[in-house]
Image (cartoon, rainbow, N blue to C red):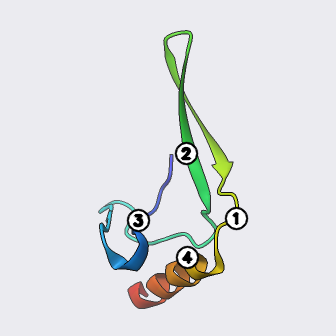
């Protein structure tokens, strides 16, 4: 569902997807996985109160990858 690479705070636990090597600065959502009638459903939810520090770290990491 998310077609990008993502990293955890402070540069640890990188998740680099070969098919989607770049980060999307507009992706500030959680993926919600639910089971309904024995089927998996995927939806998104905005991250509440995403701190400016985390947003700045994400944008800094995106700048380094360019």
Q: Nearer the viewer, mark 1 or mark 2?
A: 1
What distance separates the C-alpha of mark 4 from that of mark 2?
18 Å
> Which residue was labeled with disc 2?
31
Secondary structure under tag 1 reads loop
> Which residue was labeled with disc 4?
54
Please say if 65 is above or below 33.
Answer: below
Could you tell me residue 59's position as x and y percent? 54, 83
Q: Is there a contact, CB below 8 Å, between mark 2 and mark 3?
A: no
Q: Is there a contact, CB below 8 Å, between mark 4 and mark 1?
A: no
The image quarter containing residue 32 is top right
Q: Quadrant of the C terminus?
A: bottom left
The image quarter containing residue 17 is bottom left
Q: Is there a contact, CB below 8 Å, between mark 4 and mark 2?
A: no
Could you tell me residue 23's position as x and y percent? 48, 71
> Mark 1 vs mark 2: which is more N-terminal?
2
Q: Nearer the viewer, mark 3 or mark 1?
A: 1
Secondary structure under tag 2 reads strand
Q: Nearer the viewer, mark 2 or mark 3?
A: 2
Please say if 10 is above or below 16.
Answer: below
Residue 5, disc: 3
> Mark 4 vs mark 1: which is more N-terminal?
1
Could you tell me residue 9's position as x and y percent? 42, 73
> Which residue was labeled with disc 1?
49
Residue 61 placement, left or right of 29: left
For the image shown, how many numbered marks are present on the structure?
A: 4
Secondary structure under tag 4 reads helix
Secondary structure under tag 3 reads loop
């Amino acid at each position: 569902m998310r077609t990008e690479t993502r990293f955890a705070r402070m540069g640890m636990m990188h998740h680099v997807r070969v098919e989607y090597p770049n980060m999307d600065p507009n992706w500030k959502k959680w993926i919600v996985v639910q089971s309904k009638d024995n089927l998996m459903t995927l939806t998104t939810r905005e991250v509440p109160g995403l701190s400016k520090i985390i947003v700045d770290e994400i944008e800094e990491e995106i700048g380094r990858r360019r």
